Image: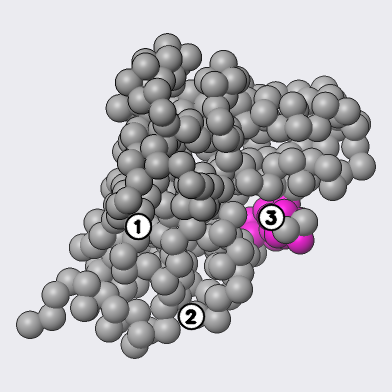
Amino acid sequence: METIKEQILRLKKEKNAVILAHFYQTMDIQEIADVVGDSFELAKRAKASDADIIVLCGVRFMAESAKILNPEKRVLLPAADAGCPMADMVTPEDVRELKAAYPEAAVVCYINSSAAVKAESDICCTSSSAEKVIRSLKQDKIIFIPDQNLGAYAATKVPEKEFILFSGFCPIHHHVTAEDVLAAKAAHPDALFLIHPECKPEVLAYADMIGSTSQILEYAAKSDHKEFVIGTEIGVVERLAKFHPEKRFFLLSLGFTCVNMKKTRLSDVLAALQEEKNEIHMTEEEIAAAALSLQRMVAVG
């Protein structure tokens, strides 16, 4: 009798499907994925895929992005109720109001946002591409939505431009404090601190390295150092511990668990493939409106 993993792998082949999983997914989901990556990597690999079906193991904005970049393909979101609190903090109306107040500014939209918000934006970015995206723009004034912390970090990298920051944030990153860092430093004095730019500026001030999920993983893998405190979601610590057992990894805060990212189960992936359910449906108009900002991001690289 086939195991659930064997059923998934068989159906994936039969239906010419590709499984994309974010680093914050549980390890059993990562193990059956064709590609494991951060938001930027998944966006690129979705666009490059020749599969008929994309199974996106992540949250809704990621599946929407995959659909926008691949309108001719079917995109399935196994955990249909997996949303993103940060994405929900900004609305298209918010963006229109900011554009009216600062008509000379370019709107840079973090990929952690809805398709409707992307449609109101000039270009998207990820945490790994924010600086490069902003430098690619001719405008000297930048409206950055929705993450105030990533926007503030980007502003330190491109000080010659003026930033208007929206007040959104990722709850799990935003709630980490400088006191949490000091406690972790006391507990692990020999560790390097690798921190995601969605954290507050006063937390980033203590970092030995600031980077996206994929950049943190790469840095920890290549470093000669043996101990690391990881300032992002617990899935990253689990992946590092699995692939680098010779090193020690500690979570910066016990609150670093994204509930929405943990909703996907192997049974959900199997059901999505068996029944081809939880498909992302968008009109041609919705896709066309949101596509330009994502395509510009991919083009910047």
Residue tagged 2:
52
Q: Secondary structure at mark 3?
A: helix
What secondary structure is found at the residue carrying circle 2? loop
Q: Main secondary structure of the magenta part?
A: helix
Task: Please tell me whether mark 1 sits on a helix, a strand or a loop.
Answer: helix
Q: Nearer the viewer, residue 9 or 123?
A: 9
Tag shown at residue 243: 1
Are the residues tagged 3 and 2 within 8 Å (C-beta)? no
- Which color scheme does this rendered protein use? one colour
Residue at the image point whose x is 35% and y is 39% from the top: 249
Q: Which residues are magenta?
A: 286-299
> What quarter of the picture does the C terminus occupy?
bottom right
For the residues marked 1 and 3, what is the alpha-carbon distance in whole angstroms? Answer: 32 Å
Q: Position of residue 148 (x, y in %)?
A: 62, 25
Q: Is residue 276 above or below residue 148?
A: below
Comes first in the chain, label 1 or label 3 = 1
- Examine the image and state in which quarter residue 30 appears: bottom left
Q: Is residue 294 magenta?
A: yes
Residue 98 picture location, percent across and down? 76, 26
The label number, if any, that marks residue 294 in the structure image: 3
Residue drawn at x 34%, y 79% is: 12
